[in-house]
Amino acid sequence: MTETGDLQIVIVESLTRRYTTLAEKVRELAGCLSDEQFWQKPFPFGNSIGHLVLHLTGNLSYYIGAQIAQTGYVRDRDLEFTESRHPAKTDVMRRFDDAVAMVIKTIHAQSASDWAREYSAQREDATHRFDILFRCATHFHLHVGQMIYLRYQLNGKA
């Protein structure tokens, strides 16, 4: 295999593993919460785990889905943090799982030359496809950290 081919494999496998691992952690953290706990804010500031899952779903669906996979997703970022209807946890988690599956499918659809293709989106300064996929993974990781802390506050363990 060529160096480009080797790098392509490393990029696809690494990003797939990272998104899969982070999604598994979100499922684990949300798994034992009731619907009420899922939407509960343990502090007068900040977010609930439910709102963070909505936010991650919107982030991935917009930056990767709409901009790379051309899914047609239209984002309402503010609603990700203010949704007051509190949909069922199972519905929110299903949409989250669908978004992660779309990201992984999109990663696997990239050719070696696609990683350097120009990228632009609202509220984002990433300039290439690899850059946005890497940045979304680090953003994902940040919010998983917040969820760990929230889960600890809700249940005394994470």
Image (spheres, rainbow, N blue to C red):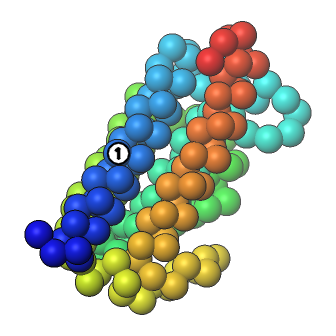
Residue 63 x %, y %: 47, 69
* Residue sitting nearer the eye, 92 or 24: 24
Residue 118 x %, y %: 42, 89
Q: Residue at x 41, y 38 (%)?
A: 21
* Residue sitting nearer the eye, 91 or 104: 104
Left or right: 82 as drawn, with respect to 103: right
Residue 19 x %, y %: 40, 47
Number of numbered labels in the structure image: 1
On the question of residue 58 being in view, the answer is no
Q: Residue at x 80, y 41 (%)?
A: 46
Q: Residue furthest top?
A: 156
* Quadrant position of residue 150: top right
Q: Residue furthest bottom?
A: 118
Q: Residue at x 55, y 50 (%)?
A: 140
* Rendered view: 87 above or below 158: below
Q: Residue furthest right?
A: 44
* Rendered view: 96 above or below 86: below
Q: Which residue does the numbered mark 1 point to in the structure image?
A: 17
Quadrant position of the C terminus in the picture: top right
On the question of residue 66 being in view, the answer is yes
Left or right: 64 as drawn, with respect to 75: left
Q: Amino acid at mark 1?
A: Arg
Circle 1 residues within 10 Å: few <14, some 14–19, many ≥20: few
Q: Residue furthest left?
A: 1
Q: SS of the residue at dot 1?
A: helix
* Rendered view: 45 above or below 122: above
Q: Residue at x 18, y 71 (%)?
A: 5
